[in-house]
Every structure is written in structure tokens, then in C-alpha cells.
Amino acid sequence: MTDRIWSVYLSGEIHTDWRERIAKGVSDENLPVDLLSPVTVHETSDMCGVEILGAEDQAFWQDHKGASVNALRTRTLIHRADIVVVRFGDKYKQWNAAFDAGVASALNKPIITLHDPSLTHPLKEVDASALAVAKTPEQVVRLIKYAIKGEL
């Protein structure tokens, strides 16, 4: 299974360096992985709908339009992914990450959740759909390595 490139979608929290830590770990382990992610620049993600499709008078419709345009990317990349990693931070509510976990689950994609142990109770339903619950990005890298190479 190591002769192909695996696609790993990194969903969720954008305020810490977890994606960079996973990218470094994947690189350091020389894993055949293509890392995919949503748009992580807040303003770009929030404004994409109105920038592309035109202004809206009400904030609700602006947000709705942006969410729909972002879904073009996220659903496509989740569908393409071999593994979906969903990160929940403790500082902000990541409703989009919960949505992505639901999409991945509906598509029968293997899910790894990543969050602090203090979030175990609030995320119990999301964690129940995951094949692994990691506490650190380094654990995620080890899980990916094990899935690809069967090595610890």
C-alpha cells in the first residue's frame, strides 16, 4: 500500500500550528501523503461568496453564500481524501469541523479527531464516529504512518 500517494484532509481549527506540525511530521517520516485543507485565511473564507457571486444586503445571506461556496471545496476534497483529520480547538467553536466530520462519516471516510482531553465529553458523538482520537499532531502523524506503512 506504500506505492501510492495518500490524500489526508485536515479540517477544523485555524488558530494554531497543528497543520504545520503534521506537515513537518509527514515530511520527516517521508510519507507518501498529499495534505489537503479548507481555505484557512479567515477573511478569504468568509468573503468568498460575495466576492465571487455578488454582495448581499443581510449578513445571514452573506454567510450563507460563503458557506455554500466553501462547501464546493471542502466536500470535493473530503470525497477525495483517504483519511480525514478533524481538529477541534478549545478556544473557538468549530462548527465547520463538526460538519466536515459528518460529511466524512456519511462518505464512510476514516476519521481521526484531534483535540485536547478537556473536550472529550462535548465531542463524544463526533469521537464515536472516529477510528482514532488523538491529543497531539504528532500522534496523528504516527497514526498516518501506521495506516500507510504498518510501522510504529
Image: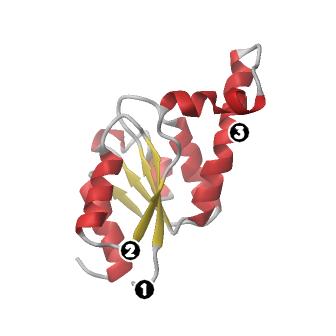
What amino acid does circle 1 point to? Answer: Asp
> Mark 3 or mark 1, which has the lower sequence index?
1
Name the residue at 39% across, 42% down: 121
Q: For residue 142, what is the image quadrant?
A: bottom left
Q: What secondary structure is found at the residue carrying circle 3?
A: helix
Q: Position of residue 109 (x, y in %)?
A: 56, 65
112 or 6, which is in the foreground? 6
Mark 3 packing: few (<14 Cα in 10 Å), some, or many (20+)? few
> Looking at the image, what colour scheme do you see?
secondary structure
Q: Is residue 118 left or right of residue 60?
A: left
Kindly check if marks 1 and 2 are in contact, taking CB atoms under 8 A apart as contact: yes
Q: What secondary structure is found at the residue carrying circle 2?
A: loop
Name the residue at 67% across, 26% down: 63
Residue 52 image label = none
Mark 1 packing: few (<14 Cα in 10 Å), some, or many (20+)? few
Kindly check if marks 3 and 2 are in contact, taking CB atoms under 8 A apart as contact: no
Residue 45 lies, with reference to residue 150, above or below; the image says above
Q: Which residue is mark 3?
A: 68
Q: Position of residue 114 (x, y in %)?
A: 36, 50
Q: Which residue is mark 2?
A: 32
What amino acid does circle 2 point to? Answer: Pro
> Mark 1 or mark 2, which has the lower sequence index?
1
Q: Which residue is mark 1?
A: 3
Q: Is residue 13 left or right of residue 137?
A: right
What amino acid does circle 3 point to? Answer: Ser
Quarter of the image with the N terminus in it? bottom left
Name the residue at 68% across, 48% down: 72
Name the residue at 28% across, 72% down: 30
> Mark 3 or mark 2, which has the lower sequence index?
2
Q: Position of residue 77 (x, y in %)?
A: 59, 57
Direction top: furthest residue:
57
